[in-house]
Image (tube, rainbow, N blue to C red):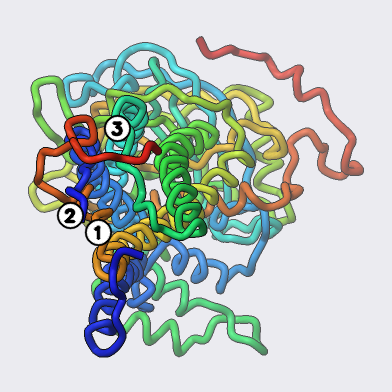
Amino acid sequence: MNPIVFFARSSRVLHWLMAVLILVMLFVGVFMAASVGPAYHALVGFHRPLGIALLALVVLRLINRFFHRPPALPIDLPPLMVFGAKASHWALYALMMALPLIGWAMLSAGGYPIPLFGNDVLLPPILPHDAALWGWLRLAHTVLAFALFALIMAHGGAALFHFLICRDSVLQSMVGAGSVSPTKSVSPRVTD
Amino acid sequence: MAGNASGGSGGLIRWLGVVSLPVALAVGFAAAAGWLSPHRVTPDTLLAALQGVDGAHPGFRRNHAKGVCVAGWFEGNGQAASYSSAFAFDTKRVPVIGRFALAGGMPYQGDAPGKVRSMALALKGPGGQEWRMGLNDIPVFPVSTPQEFQALQQAVRPVAGTGKPDPLAIRRFRTAHPWLASAGKALAERPITSGFENDTYRSLDSFVLHGVDGHSTAMRFAMVPEEQKFADLPGRGENASFDQLNEAISAHPLRWTLVLTLAGAGDAVSDPSRIWSDKDQQITAGTLTLTRLASETGGDCTGITFDPLVLPEGIMASDDPVLQARSATYMRSFGERSREKRPVPAYDPAVVPGLEPGAKTGSDSVSPEKAS
């Protein structure tokens, strides 16, 4: 078996940090949307700045990806699974980017002030005030959050499928505490 | 493939391992979303309870459905500035958009004296700061929690056949909630003024003022009219009290005084159904001036929701549970109605009573006193 080619350390840190934050975000979001208190107001106040933080992190992550290409997929992976892997990863990036932007945009269109911390630091609106637009963006925020959650379930299942069924090194390349990054690796790798 | 996905029990266990993570996530998500707890009170169940009483009226607010937009300004007097750093307590004039409405989800209900009137306001401060409020002309809120609100709506739901609430269901609600008896009494015995234009509107819920020195003060507040008239009852008729309001505001600007009531030692800050002591300290914080009405069709009040938790720096939510339920449910109502076809509101101030709809008066001729 070839030595494991790990993701770059920065990629792994960003992946796991965002994994935790996105799961927190999705659970908080779906909980508060079906809540009338007592934690509702505090959770909404937590959801907004965390969303902005995730927007910053996903931008950072795309920049990081440009400098640190991910390790290649196993060469014996069937073409359909390769397609599924690539498509689902780009869908994950698209949703990680879209959800905070839509959250910000919907509050803008709804004419809401958008407090970031307390009530004194406000975000500027990024869309003109338009109630119909607010209504549809609010719905899109929910639908896309559900889509992101479904993708995360599939992503987690796929990682375990690689680990338990294929028994390849896909999961370890992101989990691994090892320090062999693709750039330092001596093993031959197929470019992405 | 690199692995040997062997059959047998080892393979089964491995496959169980694969699905365990997605299944665990799905169960957790369903629990957070409330799908496993059908009795949870949510914005959706509160809206369903309201619609159970008044029916579905697409495009309208789910409560306080019949209303009219209003505009004017607010000017603080500085007397509350030592309690809160909020912009509204400065002495600067800020623009206000608002809405007068009748409580209830029926957008075409006829006006009648006993109906609860509301005044919703958005005070627009500098730098995007806003203070939104939804005030009602009742002394206290009829219930103390969102759960009780939902139970009350379910108790007063009209019964098929009679079209009226079941008296037994109402009695059951009362016996199950003896602590709400004093609120019910206060509501039944409230004095009724002759119209929107001379009514007192109260926050009902409590808020917390924050001063620059870090000091916190719990309070409720009210808009007290320049003059109150109890003598004549409002007229009956489809839009009698809206016509009367339009007449009054066309004659001269209408003024209210913002009065803050500071919580005393025995006052229930977290229970809007409790009356506070009449010995509490009160502060006159400023003056609201409303100068013109506008139809909800295209009016400034239609595209926002008067969420009482849209607060400026210097004012915070209290732990009153009804406040958060209002915020969450107003947002849900606002989202739903904004996706629905735009309805035709019952009242248009530009239509002269008695004339055919569409006949416009020169409503623009009302002296346009501009807010700065």
- Marks 3 and 2, Cα distance to the nearest angstrom? 44 Å
Q: Is residue B287 visible?
A: yes
> Which image quadrant for residue A67?
top left
The reply, left or right, for residue B72 in relation to residue A103 is: right
Tell me the kind of residue under disc 3: Leu
Q: Secondary structure at mark 2?
A: loop
- Identify which amino acid the numbered label 1 is placed on: Arg
Chain of the residue where label 2 is placed in the rendered structure? B
State the image coordinates of residue B75 (x, y, percent, origin top left). Answer: 40, 18
The residue carrying mark 1 is B274
User: What residue is disc 2 on?
Assistant: B268
Q: Quadrant of the N terminus of chain A?
A: bottom left
Q: Are marks 1 and 2 in contact (CB under 8 Å)?
A: yes
Chain at numbered mark 1: B
> Residue B347: where, in percent of width, then height?
73, 45
Residue A17: x percent and y percent? 20, 42
Tell me whether the residue at label 3 lies in contact with that at label 2, contact meaning CB atoms closer than 8 angstroms.
Answer: no
Q: Are marks 1 and 2 on the same chain?
A: yes
Seen in the picture, residue A83 relative to B290 is either above or below; the reply is below
Where's residue B285, x and y in %?
30, 25
* Separation of residues labelled 1 and 3 (CA atoms): 47 Å
Q: Nearer the viewer, mark 3 or mark 2?
A: 3
Q: Is residue B143 visible?
A: no
Q: Are marks 1 and 3 on the same chain?
A: no
Of the numbered discs in the image, which one, if any, rests on residue A57? 3
Q: Quadrant of the C terminus of chain A?
A: top left
Query: Above or below — where is B299 with respect to B109?
Result: above
Q: Relative to the observer, which residue lies in front, B58 or A23?
A: A23
Q: Nearer the viewer, residue B126 or B44?
A: B44
Name the subunit of mark 3.
A
Amino acid type assigned to the residue bearing label 2 in the image: Ala
